[in-house]
Image (cartoon, coloured by chain):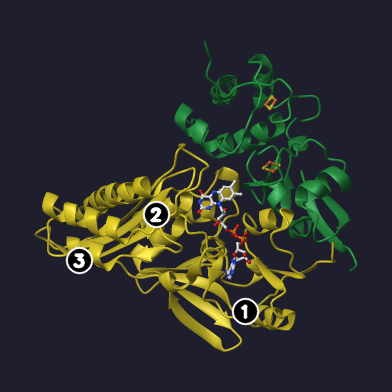
């Protein structure tokens, strides 16, 4: 069967690609569009390393077909920093040493940004539940949660101690 | 790997025609959180994927006759955003919201949860307790089916070839009605229910229960609607004697499996405990409704 011709928007830019039905959005991002920031940890919806936003909703791109991207607006980790300027979440992940191998990091960042965009002042419990679908095998969750809470405080314009 | 077709029908009729032509080799795609996992694992190998999300009504929630019509492909996160239905049917919304992570919530649907037909599907006992009905479209037209009549066993449904679910109707809630869903999982997030219990009940002005529906998940091959558990509540003020009867009736209905997440004895006991707790939450909600 002929490949699907898909027109979509990724990080604000119009993008066209060809894909087979079986290719997931994650496959397309990584293999067709060379957007390799989104990672494949499990390919079964369990780890969150592939997290992206589709029309503003946080999803696992390993559980979305590439062809479903037609006409949608997709946001990936590549759209997070503005040029050389890191997003506060990225900066705080560095400051808090909230990453080691880094495989889980793009997913955590995309998911955390989605939380802070809708809830600028989450409790620690809210952050932990929101990120329950993001797994990290090396850093441990505490540093990640601290980094998110600290970034949230900074984005609210609060000084932190 | 065979070539796999993909279609986005724009109407129910078009979807039904596609399914009929595919002669059982098609699969419906809603959120894909079961289907795409199963395809990757080689458990299913369809020739055609019918993505129903472009069909009008499949992704909308509308108020209707005091109740709600919920498109079969509405995602969990979309339903949780609705303050009105969260207030009217908190048990249903909470049960749906328990499915998976934030990411899974961005895609998972009620239609997929029901038609995947896992005995542990979280939204199903809550829908059954609420008295939800499914609109089923197929070659023979449309029929309305109580949710409890859809699953027939693990991975199996009563849908006939070419049929699919278009939407669910939650009835108008009688005054003094509340619902609740509780599940037990070994972790606090991201796990499969060992037991799930949905309760919906109505209290009169004097606090006497006048109607109830109790549904159990994960303790039998399909969701169970348990009339004896409902009978234990009706006529009572949910005193200890009534709760004991409820507990016993819930336990008596269980036909669970033994597996690493729960023995038969454990699942049975927990079904009784959760039924009591869910009934008390539903009663609290009924009083403030
Ligand atoms: C990480 C993870 C965690 C999960 N956690 C839970 C959990 O806690 N509780 C739980 O209950 N489930 C859980 N699930 C399973 C799954 O997310 C749910 O069952 C979900 O509701 C499925 O909906 P969907 O729209 O993604 O279905 P899909 O994958 O699109 O479809 C599922 C099946 O139903 C069929 N189908 C879909 N819609 C229709 C329709 N309208 N008419 C007829 N057939 C239809 C499909 O063909 C397919 O066979 C989890 C899954 C993952 C990956
Ligand atoms: S790769 Fe998608 S959730 Fe793990
Ligand atoms: S930093 Fe290695 S998995 Fe999280």
Side of B166 relative to B233 (left or right): right
The front one of B154 and A145 is: B154
- Circle 2 or circle 1, nearest the eye: 1
- The secondary structure type at the circle numbered 1 is helix
Q: Position of residue A59 (x, y in %)?
A: 64, 47
Instruction: State ligand 1's quadrant.
Output: bottom right
Q: Residue furthest bottom?
A: B140
In the rendered view, tell whether residue B128 sits above or below residue A79. below
Task: Tell whether circle 3 marks a residue whose Cβ is less than 8 angstroms from ligand 1.
Answer: no
Mark nearer the N terminus (3 vs 2): 2
Mark nearer the N terminus (3 vs 1): 1
Mark nearer the N terminus (2 vs 1): 1
Which quadrant of the rendered structure holds the N terminus of chain B? bottom right
In the rendered view, tell whether residue B156 sits above or below residue A9. below
Circle on res. B86: 2
Side of B172 relative to B139 (left or right): left
Q: Which residue is mark 1?
A: B12
- The secondary structure type at the circle numbered 2 is helix
In the rendered view, tell whether residue B30 sits above or below residue A108. below
């Amino acid at each position: 069967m002929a490949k699907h011709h898909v027109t979509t928007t990724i990080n604000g830019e119009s993008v066209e690609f060809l894909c087979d039905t079986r290719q997931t959005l994650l496959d397309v991002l990584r293999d067709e569009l060379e957007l390799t920031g989104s990672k494949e940890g499990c390919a079964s919806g369990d780890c969150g390393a592939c997290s992206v936003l589709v029309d503003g909703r946080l999803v696992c791109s390993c559980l979305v077909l590439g062809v479903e991207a037609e006409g949608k607006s997709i946001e990936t980790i590549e759209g997070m920093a503005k040029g050389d300027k890191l997003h506060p979440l990225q900066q705080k992940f560095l400051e808090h040493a909230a990453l080691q191998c880094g495989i889980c990091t793009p997913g955590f960042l995309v998911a955390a940004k989605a939380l802070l965009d809708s809830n600028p002042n989450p409790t620690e419990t809210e952050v932990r539940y929101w990120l329950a679908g993001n797994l990290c095998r090396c850093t441990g969750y505490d540093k990640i949660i601290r980094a998110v809470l600290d970034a949230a405080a900074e984005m609210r314009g609060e000084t932190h101690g | 790997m065979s070539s796999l077709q993909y279609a986005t029908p724009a109407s129910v009729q078009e979807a039904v025609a596609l399914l009929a032509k595919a002669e059982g080799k098609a699969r419906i795609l809603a959120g894909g959180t079961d289907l795409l996992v199963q395809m990757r694992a080689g458990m299913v190998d369809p020739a055609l994927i019918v993505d129903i999300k472009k069909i009008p009504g499949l992704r909308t929630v509308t108020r209707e006759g005091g109740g709600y019509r919920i498109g079969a492909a509405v995602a969990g996160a979309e339903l949780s955003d609705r303050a009105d239905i969260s207030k009217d049917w908190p048990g249903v919304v909470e049960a749906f919201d328990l499915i998976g992570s934030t990411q899974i919530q961005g895609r998972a649907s009620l239609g997929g949860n029901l038609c995947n037909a896992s005995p542990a599907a979280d939204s199903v006992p809550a829908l059954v307790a609420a008295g939800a009905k499914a609109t089923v479209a197929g070659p023979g037209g449309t029929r309305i089916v109580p949710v409890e009549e859809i699953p027939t066993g693990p991975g199996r449904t009563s849908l006939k070839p070419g049929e699919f679910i278009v939407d669910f109707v939650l009835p108008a809630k009688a005054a003094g009605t509340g619902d609740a869903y509780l599940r037990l999982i070994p972790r606090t997030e991201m796990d499969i229910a060992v037991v799930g219990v949905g309760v919906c009940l109505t209290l009169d002005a004097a606090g006497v229960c006048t109607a109830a529906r109790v549904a159990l998940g994960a303790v039998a091959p399909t969701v169970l609607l348990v009339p004896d558990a409902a009978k234990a509540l009706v006529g009572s003020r949910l005193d200890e004697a009534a709760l004991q009867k409820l507990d016993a009736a819930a336990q008596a209905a269980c036909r669970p499996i033994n597996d690493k997440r729960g023995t038969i004895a454990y699942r049975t006991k927990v079904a009784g405990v959760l039924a009591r707790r869910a009934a008390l939450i539903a009663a609290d909600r009924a009083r403030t409704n």
